[in-house]
Amino acid sequence: MVVAVVVLAFTGPVGWDSQVCWKTVQTLRQGGDPYANGIASLQQFQEREGADSNARPPLVYVYSPMTLPLLRMTERFPGWALGVFYTGAIVIGVLLQLWAGFQMADQGERRWLALLLPVAVFFPGLVTDDVILSGNVAYILYGMVLAAAVAGWKRGSWSWFYAAVLVASAFKAPFLSLLAFPVLMDRKRWIPSGLTAAAGVLMFTGQMLIWPKMFREYLVAIRLMFEVGQDFGYSPAGTVGRALRSLGLPFSQGTSALYVLFAGVIGFVLLDLAHRVREGKLPQERWIPVALVGTLLLNPRIMKYDLAAITIPMLLIGWRTLRFASIRWAANSESAGSRPKHPNRTAILVGSGCFLIANIMTCAGPTWFPVELVVLLAIFAMGIWSLDRFRSELAPRI
């Protein structure tokens, strides 16, 4: 994995997201306003967009004003030291994500999963992409949050998880949606999750009073990021928003309504599944990946680095569902007098075929087709199906 990342870094673009943070540090050192600079860059691009339709919009700083004091603390350090420290933090974040995903596997799965971990970083959401080279802070944040989540589902200690989500929400407010995960693991977590969510909302809205000018500029920069950069992500609302924007139609109200509707449906499905899982007394490792993938679907703007955080859970869901279906098919074939097939071999062949089709479509298919969203929703649907069927298998026969 390390060798591949180094080779890619020397043969192509690298650190496009982390460079935004470095430019912001330089702007702060010069006493400038990073939001005003970003707004000006996006507006200039918007003005000349018609002259050069193939140009890519600039990346600008769109983290909340409360993150700027942290960047100011780095002003005393040289650039090379910051680069080494940040790269090390990204590496640790990636390793923590992989470690957390590994904890969701059973003993039999860990034998082959250990071989796939280095490859998984190049297939966020099971679809090929080089987002690992972006240096986005999300890798650090997700590593911190998922590592804390392991302590939550294994030992029932969720304090570090709440703290990690609160810190992560300072950079990306949608991280607050992850507070649904402890509730899905333990119905007693409603109050602490709710209090943490309230603290996150207060922390976010309180910036309007502390930094009113910068907070207004921050909101303008976010709006321009959608209008100019079409940086909607891969959620259902984001996919529809991108389509509406490409057609020159207004997207704000429509995507907001779609997100509320979709999040409501996903939330209901997850709570119902959690209730049925507790009643059916299913093994925890079967429920955790489904709950985590479903929780991420509550994020209004799912990006490639968000999908990277759930790549291992998605892989486990896909494998378990295909293997379970193959075992049932083999059993039905044997009872019907046909020659039974090897369930593991069948699951591998079917899974490999689906994986290749998705990645071929990403590389050679139509650019408008939301492959990442289709794969994500398909995996979540497979998880629901497998949980329901597995629960039925365990139900006592009367």
Image: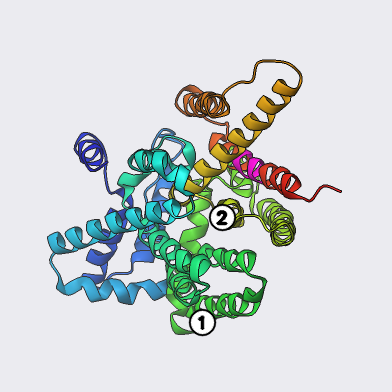
State the image coordinates of residue 304 (x, y, percent, origin top left).
Answer: 45, 46
State the image coordinates of residue 250 (x, y, percent, origin top left).
Answer: 65, 48
Can I make out residue 319 in this image?
yes
Residue located farthest toward the right when viewing the structure as drawn: 398
- Neighbor class of circle 2 (other Cα within 10 Å; few <14, some 14-19, many 20+) is many
Q: Callout 1, which amino acid?
A: Gly
Magenta stretch holds residue 380: yes
The answer to whether residue 108 is left or right of residue 181 is: left
Query: Can you say whether 289 is above or below 325 in the image?
Result: below
- Residue found at x 72% / y 43%: 389
State the image coordinates of residue 15 (x, y, percent, origin top left).
Answer: 28, 49
Q: How is the image coloured?
A: rainbow
Looking at the image, which is closer to me, 175 or 22?
175
Using the rendered view, name the quadrant where residue 68 is placed. Answer: bottom left
Image quadrant holding the N terminus, namely top left
Indicate which disc residue 296 carries. 2
- Neighbor class of circle 1 (other Cα within 10 Å; few <14, some 14-19, many 20+) is some
- Residue found at x 34% / y 53%: 94
The answer to whether residue 79 is left or right of residue 271 is: left
State the image coordinates of residue 96 (x, y, percent, origin top left).
Answer: 36, 58
Indicate which disc residue 206 carries. 1
Please, what is the dominant secondary structure of the magenta stretch?
helix
Tag 1–tag 2 contact (CB < 8 Å): no
Q: Which residues are magenta?
A: 378-383
Q: Callout 2, which amino acid?
A: Leu
Looking at the image, which is closer to me, 182 or 340?
340
Cα distance, mark 1 to mark 2? 26 Å
Query: Can you say whether 6 is above or below 150 in the image?
Result: above
Query: Can you say whether 124 is above or below 189 in the image?
Result: above
Q: Earlier in the sequence, mark 1 or mark 2?
A: 1
